[in-house]
Amino acid sequence: MAKSRRIHLINPRADTFATRPLFFGKALYSPVAGLLAVAALIPEEEYEIILTDENIEPIDFDLKVDMVGISAMTSYVNRGYEIADAFRAQGIPVIMGGVHVSYLPEEALKHADAVVVGEAELLMDKILDDLRHHRLKGIYKAETLHSMIGMPNPRQGLLKSNRYINKGFVQTSRGCHHGCLFCAEPTMYGLRFRYRPVEDIIAEIEHIEERVILLNDADFFGTPKRAMDVMKAFKGRGLQWQAAVNSRDAHDERLLELAAESGCFMLSIGFESISKQTLRNVHKLQNNPDSYHELVEKLHRYGIMVLGLFMYGFEGDESSVFEETLKFNINAKFDMCGYSLLTPYPGTITWFEMMRKKQLVSFDWDKYDQSHIVFKPGGLSADQLYSGYLDTYDGFYTVSSMLRRFPWDGSRNRANWTVYNAFFRKGGVVTRDYDLLVAKSTPEPEFAAMPPLMPQKAAWRELVLGTREVE
């Protein structure tokens, strides 16, 4: 039976090294896991789904469809708006979703017919019913959080898998226990964990037929017993997997033993800073810089690569932070390091603090990608932050540094190590042009950001509401 309707799901182009096809026409990561999950909510027998990732292919604006769905993060939401405007000019209804528009739905409604705020699983039936009756319009907000029970498998068959190195994304949980001020998790989902049934996770892995898996959780080790249950189910399946975890629980030998036995080859950890005071200031309380070196050595003993994430631009950062961090990272033999600039994403606690202090300079969303300076740094000049950020990146990925950090002893997979270092070395910095990296001043946005979930902490609630009143 012919399908009566067509829906075009689009991921706009993002200027990041992880999503650009830098080597052999392949990107390091596929950014469309969320859209594959959305596609799974749409009845296959009724709708034909076309999926376009603009990072690897052009958008067909002449395609005849009944609806366009666009998912966009802050750094490429402007491109998402351009795409939405182009389709709406043809009379095609457009709906937008994602973290940015969940905080700024009124802004998105200037470009889209409808906006999804929160998790689509709770809203798709209503959206499709309104589409059928030609009344798709306004804000569709999920008033609760999805339990992750009974979720359908993502439509992996829509993915052009030959264009990505990492494309087997699997989400085992949603949520995070940590209230880092610069992160969207506390105000997007609250400090709450939800878990997908282990048998459903295994069914999804068998369904997607990928043996290299990226666990798309905010903090896979966040509830250790739960993580152990999942890893026990992974054992004996021939998987290779990677995940983001917190530094405190990554010390747990029980977790690491199971991780190694079940196929873990890399863990991504947000170390952020080597300053204890800085970590306290941003509520990254689970991190202890005194144990970073030990943790890297421990993970290496289990054959696990470490992707260390560090951030510059925190209040109190001094000019010495760049050289000290670089030396520490090389001496500790981090396998890879991702260096970023503090970015006050709309709706985070850091955003509201900087709005209150009038510290934000640019509201050009294209620059909100952790690779541009959009605010007045507290302890450094923009010049120091610019040069220190670039010097650290260049220093860590010099040939001498790579030779020193290379796993000569064979404790980690050398091919994986080489591929990841090649991508980071070639594309880790978006621009070296000072006039581009240091964003120009712009007017404040027309609409005030508002969290989908109000923060639980009273002081944070007061900050959010107080800033909104000022605006």
Image (spheres, rainbow, N blue to C red):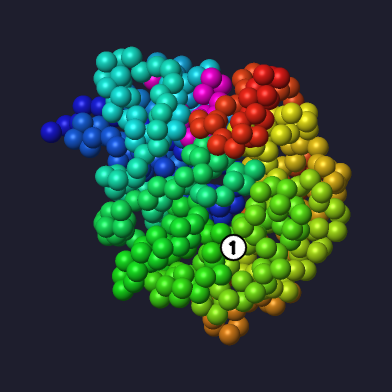
Disc 1: CA contacts within 10 A as few (<14), some (14-19) or many (>=20): many
Residue that appears at 34% across and 29% down: 123
Q: Amino acid at mark 1?
A: Ser
Assign a secondary structure to mark 1.
Answer: loop
Q: Position of residue 108 (x, y in %)?
A: 52, 23
Query: In this view of the protein, can residue 270 be seen by the observer?
Result: yes
> Could you tell whether 409 is left or right of 145 in the image?
right
Instruction: Report which residue position mark 1 lands on.
Output: 247
Image height of 314 relative to 331, above or below: above
Image height of 235 relative to 355, above or below: below
Name the one closer to the observer, 245 or 364.
Answer: 245
| Number of dots carrying numbers | 1
> Could you tell whether 438 is left or right of 467 in the image?
right
Q: Quadrant of the N terminus?
A: top left
Residue that appears at 78% across and 31% down: 357
Residue furthest to the front in view is 458
